[in-house]
Amino acid sequence: MLRHSLPLALLLAAAMPTHAAPPLKSQLPQRTVLNLAAAEQIAAAAAAKAREQNLTVSIAVVDEAGRLMHFQRMDGTPNSSVEVAIGKAVHAADYRRDSGFHQKLLEGGNHVVLGLPHALPIEGGVRLLLDGQVIGGIGVSGAQAAQDGQIAQAGADLLK
């Protein structure tokens, strides 16, 4: 009996009208991505802010995936600032939050922040936002954390 009903079911299914799904391409979101020219301009704005304050820092700009796009280290900046700047930028991009947000949680006693993978909860990592969408991050290190944050913000402000 099953042998005879299967072809009948196929015939009935073939006779029913079908509604074609829209092409996959139209179902995918479109997004803006950070390019090298923009990353360089963002870093230049941050460097200008650092020079204005007579500070020397390292500046890292990463894309949405947290991959390094541009890096610069000003003369006289400590060696340790290199990895810290990159870490802050990656933190901002990966967690979609400025690194200072997690620093404040940590200062408030929320020690679970220390368990976040690859997190660097120290002010100076700022999300790069365009139309409410995170397109990358900028990280600055070499001065006091609050100063690093101000310098990074100067770069991020170019997207406003």
Image (tube, grey):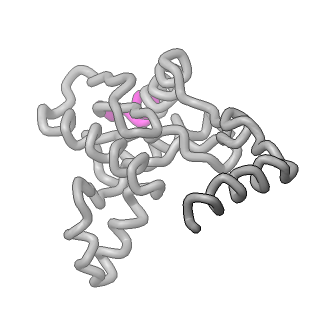
Residue 89 highlighted magenta (yes or no): no
Q: Which image quadrant: the C terminus? A: top right
Q: Is residue 103 above or below residue 123?
A: below
Q: Quadrant of residue 6?
A: bottom right
Asked if the stretch drawn in magenta spans residue 54, the answer is yes
User: The N terminus is located in which quarter?
Assistant: bottom right
Q: Position of residue 40 (x, y in %)?
A: 47, 19
Q: Is residue 7 left or right of residue 80?
A: right
Q: Is residue 150 left or right of residue 119?
A: right
Q: Residue at 48% of width from left, 26% of height from top? A: 48
Residue at image location 32% in from the left, 53% down from the top: 145
At horizontal 33% and vertical 29% (from top left) the residue drawn is 68
Closest to the observer, 84 or 95: 95
Q: Pick out the residue farthest to the top.
A: 37
Q: Which residues are magenta?
A: 50-56
Question: Residue 80: horizontal and vertical position, in percent?
Answer: 13, 38
Q: How many marks?
A: 0
Please name whichever residue, 91 or 80, is drawn nearer the observer in this view of the structure: 91
Where residue 104 sits in the image (x, y, percent)?
37, 71
Q: Nearer the viewer, residue 4 or 65?
A: 4
Task: Give the side of residue 119 with respect to residue 158, left or right.
Answer: left
Query: Percent from the top left, x then y, of residue 159?
Result: 64, 36
